[in-house]
Image (spheres, grey):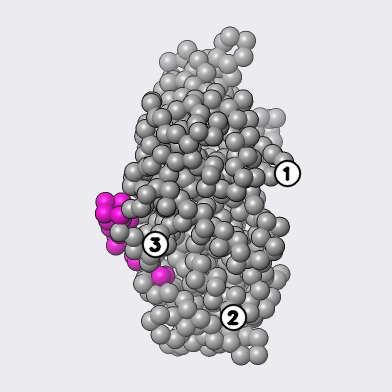
């Protein structure tokens, strides 16, 4: 893939995308017949009173071998072919097939890689398969009856299934290209190959996940839904098997990819003496604004132009030593009821592929870390749970969520006074003083951070933006230490993996970590022989 940057097209142009593609091809000395073009990035330069659309165009040549030579041929051209990922299998056969606990992005991609190399992995997933999981989530939204084993956090695909399907990541790992390639091969929309901020959409992601599972099973892998990891069997510092609520399973290799909300699993690991440690995470609320106002803030006079994508933003600041930032911004999306424990309210955000909802939403959160909890991971988990139960009580029961308008939050009045922005949280909202649900220091930081965001993005100055709480599951509050071989430093054969183990944050980075852990297992062992 090649990227041709800084292509400027007047806002008045009747076919701006086509003109940008033609300019990119001329820059490369190519014709349309020998290349595929897509918009990788699009912004607006409104300076000097003459707004221009500024494109970065992705170009895939029919003869991919030419791309490396053209990369760097002009200051505005970059890219080229990425090296292919290579995986090596060890020579010592396993006695038993490897086990993967958790079927979110990390477990999904680990299972796919292992299945393709003949390891026939066994996946244990506490939640249900996709169809039943979607039904359970819909039932919860309709009735307010929560199934702790089947919800937005647990089930096939993990927590990311009910999000925007965002693939944006800060990691720079060649395996990101492999993840994208596999998502495309299993039905993801083609534009994720070139977009700067690729997203699949919750609706499209579900089919991609089930297609990957079908391949895993066709290659000899097995997925046991409704099966929760409950314990570990060990001897002399090595893993010998696992216990589940469906019985014991012998294994000497376990990829632990349980996600950031498996608190009972975290407790089991601590009781087993596997030294979890605190890691930073964040808490706050979901902020909803009109999507049209976000786009006016970003695009100014060009807002509404049909060539422009749905407006996205990312904001951050530091207040009294703490980071305050926006997280998981969902254009044209809705706020999600994301509880997984009875008596707790949790919010998240999601968008469908079309991103055509009236509201934008994003988490506005403040960071906490081990110093806030005396470096006690159990205290960090208890803090999350305490906030969620306070939100449940403030919502008045039935998993209604506490909410407050932005102007009220900034002045500490505890009022919900919506006008143009209507809340989308599906179980309903209850007026509440959100600041009273959080420690005073965190509330002060969130107020100062939100006000600072308003100085940079006009939509954040709207007093009727709706804030819905609480957002507590931004990432895992704990990490299970692992060594250079990616095995747990306290137990050989255990591979802490993905977001729940503290090594990823989002779909892409979790999928990459799953591939890395599976690759490390493969390098140490050959597949089990026969029916082991």
* Label placed on residue 295: none
Q: CA distance from mark 3 to mark 2?
A: 26 Å
* Residue 20 belongs to the span the image colors magenta: no
Q: Closer to the camera, 294 or 82?
A: 294
Left/right of residue 250 with respect to residue 172 in the rendered view: left
Label 1 packing within 10 angstroms: few (<14), some (14-19), many (20+): few
Residues under numbered marks 3 and 2 in contact, where contact means CB atoms less than 8 Å apart: no
Q: Closer to the camera, 317 or 94?
A: 317
Vertical placement of 130 versus 16: above or below? below
Mark 1 or mark 3: name the one nearer the start of the chain: 1
Q: Could you tell me which residue is drawn at 47 percent across and 83 percent down?
A: 243
Label 2 packing within 10 angstroms: few (<14), some (14-19), many (20+): few
Q: CA distance from mark 2 to mark 1?
A: 35 Å
For the record, the magenta segment spans 125-144
x then y, percent, for residue 308: 46, 26
Q: CA distance from mark 1 to mark 3?
A: 34 Å
Image quarter where the N terminus lies is top right
Q: Residue furthest top?
A: 49
Residue topped by disc 2 = 272
Vertical placement of 414 versus 529: above or below? above
x then y, percent, for residue 126: 41, 70
Residue 469 appears in the picture as rendered: yes
Label 3 packing within 10 angstroms: few (<14), some (14-19), many (20+): some
* Secondary structure at numbered mark 1: loop
Residue topped by disc 1 = 321
Mark 3 or mark 2: name the one nearer the start of the chain: 2
Residue topped by disc 3 = 342
């Amino acid at each position: 893939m090649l990227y041709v940057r800084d292509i400027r097209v007047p806002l008045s142009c009747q076919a701006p995308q086509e003109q940008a593609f033609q300019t990119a091809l001329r820059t490369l000395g190519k014709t349309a017949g020998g290349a595929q073009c897509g918009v990788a990035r699009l912004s607006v330069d409104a300076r000097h009173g003459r707004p221009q659309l500024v494109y970065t165009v992705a170009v895939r040549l029919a003869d991919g071998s030419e791309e490396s030579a053209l990369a760097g041929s002009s200051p505005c051209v970059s890219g080229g072919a990425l090296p292919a990922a290579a995986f090596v299998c060890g020579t010592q056969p396993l006695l038993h097939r490897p086990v993967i606990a958790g079927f979110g992005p990390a477990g999904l991609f680990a299972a796919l890689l292992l299945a393709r190399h003949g390891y026939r992995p066994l996946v244990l997933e506490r939640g249900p398969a996709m169809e039943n999981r979607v039904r359970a989530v819909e039932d919860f939204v309709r009735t307010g009856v929560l199934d702790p084993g089947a919800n937005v956090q647990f089930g096939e695909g993990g927590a990311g299934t009910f999000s925007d399907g965002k693939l944006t990541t800060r990691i720079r790992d060649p395996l990101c290209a492999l993840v994208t390639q596999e998502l495309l091969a299993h039905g993801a929309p083609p534009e994720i190959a070139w977009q700067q901020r690729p997203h699949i959409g919750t609706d499209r992601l579900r089919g991609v996940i089930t297609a990957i599972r079908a391949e895993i099973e066709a290659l000899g892998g097995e997925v046991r839904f409704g099966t929760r990891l409950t314990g570990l069997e060990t001897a002399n510092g090595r893993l010998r098997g696992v216990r589940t609520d469906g019985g014991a399973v012998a294994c000497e290799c376990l990829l632990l990819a349980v996600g950031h909300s498996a608190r009972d699993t975290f407790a089991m690991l601590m009781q087993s003496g596997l030294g979890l440690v605190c890691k930073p995470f964040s808490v706050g609320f979901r902020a909803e604004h009109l999507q049209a106002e976000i786009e006016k803030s970003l695009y100014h006079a060009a807002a509404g132009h049909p060539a422009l994508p749905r407006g996205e933003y990312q904001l951050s600041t530091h207040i009294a030593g703490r980071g305050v930032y926006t997280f998981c911004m969902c254009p044209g999306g809705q706020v999600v009821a994301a509880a997984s424990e009875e008596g707790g309210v949790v919010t998240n955000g999601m968008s469908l592929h079309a991103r055509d909802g009236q509201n934008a939403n994003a988490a506005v959160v403040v960071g906490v870390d081990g110093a806030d909890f005396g470096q006690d991971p159990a205290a960090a988990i208890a803090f999350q749970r305490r906030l969620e139960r306070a939100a449940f009580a403030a919502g008045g029961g039935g998993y209604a969520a506490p909410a407050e308008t932005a102007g009220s939050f900034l002045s500490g009045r505890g009022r919900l006074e919506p006008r143009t922005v209507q809340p989308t949280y599906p179980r309903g909202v209850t007026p509440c003083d959100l600041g009273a649900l959080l420690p005073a220091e965190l509330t002060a930081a969130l107020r100062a951070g939100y006000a600072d965001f308003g100085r940079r993005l006009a939509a954040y100055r709207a007093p009727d933006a709706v804030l819905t709480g609480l957002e507590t599951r931004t990432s895992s509050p704990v990490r299970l230490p692992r060594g250079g071989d990616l095995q747990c430093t306290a137990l050989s054969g255990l591979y802490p993996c993905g977001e729940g183990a503290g090594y990823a944050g989002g779909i892409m980075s979790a999928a990459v970590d799953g591939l890395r852990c599976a690759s490390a297992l493969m390098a140490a062992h050959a597949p089990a022989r026969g029916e082991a």
